[in-house]
Image (tube, helix red, strand yellow):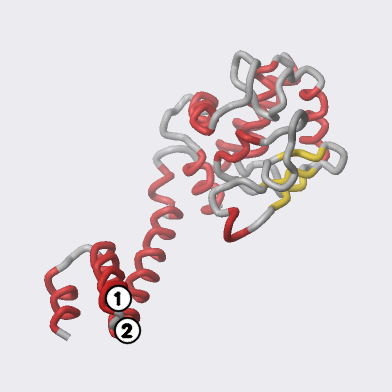
Amino acid sequence: DAMLNRVENDMTSKQSKKTLLSALLLVTGDESYRAPMLSLLQETNREYRLQKKNPRRIDSYISFDQVKERLALAERTLKASPSEEHYVDYLVLALMSGATEGVVPRRLEWASVKWRGEIDRETDNWIDTKRAVVHFLSYKTARSHGAQEVALPKHVMQVIRRWLKINKTDFLLVTKRGTKGMSGSQLSTRISEIFADRRIGVDMLRSIYLTE
């Protein structure tokens, strides 16, 4: 096929090849484009996953041991000075860094987790403090993966219960002023501030966790 040869020989970007073949399949209905398009899709996805997990990408930042050390420091700081800011710093690390056993790093949906107020248990992200479980119903891939639950370790839940006694908002994580819940961008900024490095964010923490 002349078009397939042209795509193979004249284009260098695999992503561009995949996009063009997908468009040709859609427009022409010619099934001969499907197999090479799917092959390129699998290849680009595989390369993307390897890039996300490439140790060389994260070695220039911090190690997983350093992440665990930062969590330990946050825990000590909270015990010495149980302020709102120190509670939130600890919880951000305990829930999002991967350093807490059994709590796999997620994206920024932690920002929207509620603990009281108006909670729609079919669509909201919310924490069941009695069962020590967080329910995620609103997140990036919720449509394909459905509702998810995260069981919280006893020691983390103990901190959360103490925190909720002084938390004035309906949300688990709050801004530094303590008057409202965080947006996703505010949570991302908070992570960078905790590590004193604007390059460290939720994607980096997930990558560090995956390479451990």
Q: Secondary structure at mark 1?
A: helix
Can you tell which quarter of the image residue 133 is in? top right
Residue displayed at 57% across by 37% down: 67
Residue displayed at 62% across by 33% down: 93
Residue displayed at 72% across by 47% down: 122
| Relative to 31, residue 113 above or below | above
Q: CA distance from mark 2 to mark 1?
A: 7 Å
Tag 2 near tag 1, CB within 8 Å = yes
Residue 48 is left or right of residue 93, and the answer is left
Label 2, on which residue?
31
Can you tell which quarter of the image residue 30 is in? bottom left
Label 1, on which residue?
25
Residue 38 is left or right of residue 115, and the answer is left
Q: Nearer the viewer, residue 79 or 46?
A: 46
Residue 210 is left or right of residue 52, and the answer is right
Q: Indicate the amino acid at tag 2.
A: Glu
> Quarter holding the N terminus?
bottom left
Q: Nearer the viewer, residue 10 or 34?
A: 34
Q: Dot 2: within a 10 Å radius of its alpha carbon, few (fewer than 14), some, or many (20 or more) residues?
A: few
Q: Secondary structure at mark 2?
A: helix
Task: Tell me where residue 172 appears, x and y as whole percent.
Answer: 70, 30
Task: Tell me where residue 198 appears, x and y as whole percent.
Answer: 42, 29
| Relative to 40, residue 30 above or below | below
Mark 2 or mark 1, earlier in chain? 1
Residue 162 is left or right of residue 47, and the answer is right
Residue 73 seen by the camera: no
